[in-house]
Image: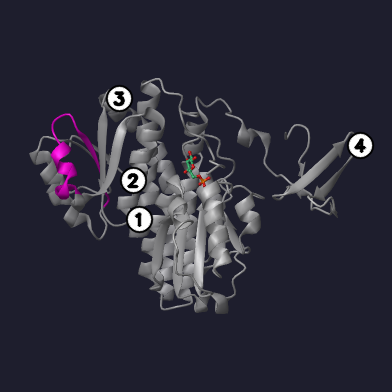
C-alpha cells in the first residue's frame, strides 16, 4: 500500500467506508457520518522488504540491536534511575494506587509476560499474575479499579488478547497496551500504551518483538519501581545494562556461524528439551516455541528443576537438551540439572556467560553470551535460541517465514 499512499484512516468495529474515485465518507451502522483522523504511516519501504536477506525472520533477528535501541530511545532517565514513556497515560498517583498487575497475552507475547511478572514483583513488590488471554476472557477474574491490566501483543490485533483487554476494562481495570503495530485495535482501545518501535515484523515467528517486549516491560518496571522502594543506584545499574544490550546482541550475531554449526548437528532431531531457571524458564519456553513454529520438531520448555518430575524420563542419547545457563543468581542450581541430563546420556547444548568449572566435561556444545543483569539475560539468550531454530528449519527445508498452520496474527477466536 505504501507505494500508493502513507495516509491511513483506521475503521473501528461497526464502521463503514464509502469510497469513490475522488472522496470517501465514514458512516456508522446507523448511517451517521463520522469524522475520522488520518494517520501517517512512517514505515520506510526498506523496512518491509526482505532487502536481500534469505528470510524476513533472519532479517528481523539481525535487526535486534537496532530494534532494542529504538525501544529505548528517549525513554531512559539515567540521572534519576528511572524511565519516561509518553503514552503511558498513568500519572504517578495512578501508578502508586495500583495494588495488583495482571499481564495477558498469547504465544511469544505470553512468554515476555512471564519475564515481566518476575521483574515487576522483584523490583516493585506489586503482585503480578500472568494469564493466557484465551483463558482469561472466560474466567471470572477478580478485578477492581486498583488493578492494572497489561496487554502484550506485537500485532495489536490478536482476537483473544483484544477480548481479554475489553473484559478487564469492563470490570474496571486500567489497561496498558504494549504493542508494536501503530494504530492497531489494541493500541487504540487501551487506556495507555508503550509502543515497541521495533519496526514491522513480517516473519510469522516473532523474534525482535520478543526482545523489545522484555525491554518495554523493564522500562515500565523502572518507572513503577522508582515510585516505590527501588533505589536510584539499582535503577542506574539496570539502565546501564539496558544501554549495553544493543552492542551485546551485535556481538552474539557476529558469531552466528557457531550456532549454524550446532544446528547442522541437530537438524535431524525429532525432539528437543529446553531448560532454564528463574528469568530463563520463559526463555526456555520461547526457545522451544521458535523451534516448534518453524521446524515442526516437537520441543518442550521446562523449569530446569521440574525436569526431575517427569520429562527426565524422555532423556537418552537421542534427546538434545538446551540449557539456558547464564551466570545469574540461580546458576549454581542449574549445574546439578545439567549433571542429571548428562548422567542419562542426554546431548547437552548450553548457553553460558562465563567459564564454569562446574560444567567442565558436561557440555556437548556451548555458546557464550555476554553477562548482564539477571532480568536481561533472556533478551541476550533469545538471540542464539532464535538462530538455532532458524538454521535447523532452513536445513530441513521449512518455509521459515510462513510456516504451516500459523498466522502472524490470529484475529479470530
Ligand atoms: C501467533 C504468532 O499467531 O500469535 C506468534 O504466530 C505470536 O508469533 C502470537 O506470538 C501472538 O501474537 P501477538 O501479535 O498478539 O503478539
Say which residue label 2 marks. 285
Q: Earlier in the sequence, mark 4 or mark 3?
A: 4
Q: Tell which tag, 1 or 2, sits nearer the viewer.
A: 2
* Badge 1 element: loop
Q: CB at mark 2 closer than 8 A to ligand 1? A: no
Give the distance between the C-alpha atoms of the residues marked 4 and 3, in whole angstroms: 55 Å
The residue sitting at 11% across, 34% down in the picture is 345
Q: Could you say which is closer to the camera, residue 132 or residue 396?
A: 132
Kindly state the secondary structure of the residue where label 4 is placed: loop
Query: Marks 2/4: CA distance?
Result: 51 Å
Q: Which mark is residue 22?
A: 4
CA distance separating discs 3 and 2:
19 Å
Residue 33's tag is none
Comes first in the chain, label 1 or label 2: 2
Q: Nearer the viewer, mark 4 or mark 3?
A: 4
119 vs 358, nearest the viewer? 119
Proximity of marks 3 and 2: CB atoms separated by less than 8 Å: no
Q: What is the magenta range?
A: 307-326
- Left or right of residue 152: residue 349: left
Q: Looking at mark 1, is its residue's CB closer than 8 Å to ligand 1?
A: no
x, y (%) of residue 283?
A: 34, 48
Residue 405 position, x and y percent, is 46, 30
Q: Is residue 84 visible?
A: no
Instruction: Tell me the crowding category of disc 1: few under 14, some 14 to 19, or many 20 or more residues within 10 angstroms, Cα based.
Output: many
Q: How far is the residue under mark 4 from the one under mark 1?
A: 56 Å
Mark 3 = which residue? 267
> Looking at the picture, how far across and down is residue 238, in whole percent?
41, 63
Front tag of 3 and 2: 2
Amino acid at each position: 500500500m505504501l507505494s500508493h499512499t502513507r495516509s491511513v484512516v483506521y475503521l473501528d468495529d461497526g464502521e463503514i467506508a464509502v469510497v469513490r474515485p475522488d472522496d470517501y465518507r465514514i458512516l456508522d451502522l446507523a448511517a451517521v457520518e463520522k469524522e475520522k483522523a488520518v494517520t501517517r504511516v512512517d514505515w520506510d519501504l526498506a523496512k518491509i522488504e526482505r532487502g536481500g536477506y534469505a528470510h524476513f525472520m533472519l532479517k528481523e533477528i539481525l535487526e535486534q540491536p537496532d530494534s532494542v535501541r529504538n525501544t529505548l530511545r528517549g525513554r531512559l532517565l539515567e540521572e534519576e534511575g528511572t524511565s519516561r514513556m509518553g503514552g503511558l497515560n498513568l500519572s504517578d498517583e495512578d501508578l502508586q494506587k495500583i495494588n495488583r498487575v495482571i499481564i495477558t497475552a498469547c504465544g511469544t507475547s505470553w512468554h515476555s509476560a512471564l519475564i515481566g511478572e518476575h521483574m515487576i514483583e522483584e523490583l516493585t513488590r506489586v503482585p503480578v499474575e500472568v494469564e493466557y488471554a484465551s483463558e482469561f476472557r472466560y474466567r471470572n477474574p477478580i478485578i477492581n479499579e486498583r488493578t492494572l491490566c497489561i496487554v502484550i501483543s506485537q500485532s495489536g490485533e490478536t482476537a483473544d488478547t483484544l477480548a481479554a483487554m475489553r473484559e478487564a476494562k469492563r470490570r474496571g481495570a486500567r489497561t496498558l497496551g504494549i504493542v508494536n503495530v501503530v494504530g492497531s485495535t489494541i493500541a487504540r482501545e487501551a487506556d495507555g500504551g508503550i509502543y515497541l518501535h521495533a519496526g514491522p515484523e513480517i516473519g510469522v515467528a516473532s523474534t525482535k518483538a520478543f526482545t523489545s517486549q522484555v525491554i518495554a516491560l523493564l522500562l515500565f518496571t523502572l518507572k513503577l519501581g522508582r515510585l516505590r522502594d527501588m533505589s536510584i543506584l539499582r535503577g542506574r545499574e539496570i539502565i546501564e545494562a539496558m544501554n549495553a544490550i544493543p552492542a551485546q546482541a551485535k556481538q552474539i550475531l557476529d558469531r552466528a556461524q557457531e550456532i549454524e554449526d550446532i544446528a547442522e548437528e541437530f537438524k535431524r532431531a525429532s525432539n528437543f528439551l529446553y531448560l532454564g531457571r528463574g528469568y530463563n524458564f520463559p526463555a526456555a519456553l520461547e526457545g522451544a516455541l521458535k523451534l516448534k513454529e518453524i521446524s515442526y520438531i516437537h520441543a518442550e520448555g521446562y523449569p530446569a528443576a521440574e525436569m526431575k518430575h517427569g520429562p527426565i524420563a524422555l532423556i537418552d542419547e537421542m534427546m538434545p537438551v538446551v540449557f539456558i545457563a547464564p551466570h545469574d543468581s540461580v546458576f549454581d542450581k542449574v549445574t546439578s540439572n545439567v549433571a542429571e541430563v548428562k548422567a542419562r546420556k542426554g546431548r547437552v547444548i548450553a548457553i553460558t556467560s562465563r567459564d564454569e568449572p562446574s560444567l567442565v566435561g558436561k557440555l556437548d556444545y556451548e555458546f557464550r553470551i555476554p553477562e548482564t543483569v539477571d532480568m536481561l539475560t533472556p533478551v541476550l539468550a533469545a538471540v542464539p535460541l532464535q538462530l538455532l531454530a532458524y538454521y535447523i528449519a532452513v536445513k530441513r527445508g521449512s518455509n521459515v517465514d510462513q510456516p504451516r498452520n500459523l498466522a502472524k496474527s490470529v484475529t479470530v477466536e
